[in-house]
Amino acid sequence: MHIPDGFIDGTTSAFGGGVAVGTVAGCLRRTRDLLDDRQVPLVGLTSAFVFAAQMLNFPVAAGTSGHLLGGVLAAVLVGPWAGALAVSVVLVVQALLFADGGLSALGLNVVNMALVGALGGYAVFAAIRALLPKTKASVVAAAGVAAALAPTMAAIVFTAEYALGGNGAASVATVAKAMIGVHLLIGVGEGAITAMTISAVMATRPDLVHGAAHIATRAPSRDDTAGVPA
Amino acid sequence: MNCRTSITTLVVGGLLGALALVFFVAPHASSSPDGLDKVAADHQLDTGKRASTVAGSPLAHYSVSGVDDSGLSKGLAGALGVAITLGIMLTATKLLTRRRSRPPAPSSAAP
């Protein structure tokens, strides 16, 4: 999903860069104002884990692979704003040091994977969660389904960027069909990895999972049963 | 707080897990092009493609230049990536939360 240099023209890439910088600035402000102090180390871990998980390409169809994008995973763990920052840092490190994703396309990649993934993906997660009972299993399920949809959301936004400034010859309809088709498949892996990881953290420290904050998840202690607002 | 896993344990455990993934799983990951690269190759989206400006980086394409064993090279590159990402994100988050203007959130142990 990392756009290399030269796929999308300079104007569209610059526009993507502007959107990315503006939105990341907003995420920095909200993280400063809203992040729970206890989550600081978890934000670091989330970013590092997404970097590692993005190296694990799994086969999805003949001659095609996919890897975790991680936006929903990060957003459910540490909140959408810090989650978007965590994925953005991964993309910056990849573009600057690992030659993965073009430098000129960095803004577009931040938009598609960090912002659509974490902010858009968290909105989908929250909508699904609202329909389900307030249980740990609901958080895992909502995260898995939202994550399964996130690569397709990124593919749709990529198609819009291609429509605005793609340098290729294929029609927008062709690109849309091909991109959405393969990313629906990649979404199966994204959803499974996200659900498994959230489930593992929920089993250990549910109180640290931002997406589970609506459930009373404090460790059981003597008189912790009554009067705890949900 | 009695028998909960501490945050330090969780973070150290998670990082060890990430390192295990890059050393032991990443070398066996699929080397097929990912979704976008495949679509690009199939439909000629890549006519304008240029090599990355940092294609000469010692860590380019997730291998450490000078390390011949490809699995080890990928694992080392991944471990460096994990460490660098962690360092940047932790530093940024710490600086951010230190600069907040309002008083800090109540601590977890507040009864």
Image (cartoon, coloured by chain):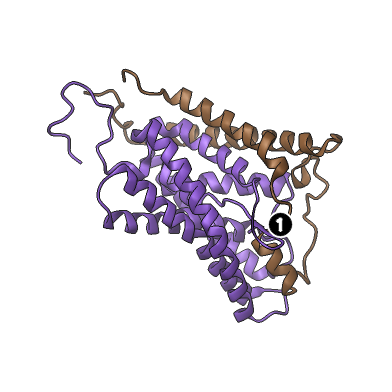
Chain colours: A purple, B brown
| Quadrant including the C terminus of chain B | top left
Q: Please say if B111 is above or below B92.
A: above
Q: Residue at x 66, y 45 (%)?
A: A55
Q: Please say if A204 is above or below A168.
A: above
Q: Where is residue A120 in the image (x, y as percent from the top left)?
A: 44, 59
Q: What residue type is labelled 1?
A: Gly
Q: Please say if A59 is above or below B43.
A: above
Q: Please say if B21 is above or below A83.
A: above
The residue beneath circle 1 is A102
Q: Which residue is drawn at 58% across and 28% down?
A: B16
Q: Position of residue B87 (x, y in %)?
A: 59, 32
- Camera sees residue B100: no
| Quadrant including the N terminus of chain B | top left
Q: Which residue is drawn at 48% across and 57% down?
A: A148
Q: Where is residue A229 in the image (x, y as percent from the top left)?
A: 17, 39
Residue at the limit of the structure toward the left, as seen here: A227
In the depicted view, which residue is nearer to us: A76 or A80?
Answer: A76
Q: In which quarter of the image is residue A63?
A: bottom right
Element type at mark 1:
loop
- Camera sees residue B78: yes
Q: In which quarter of the image is residue A34?
A: top left
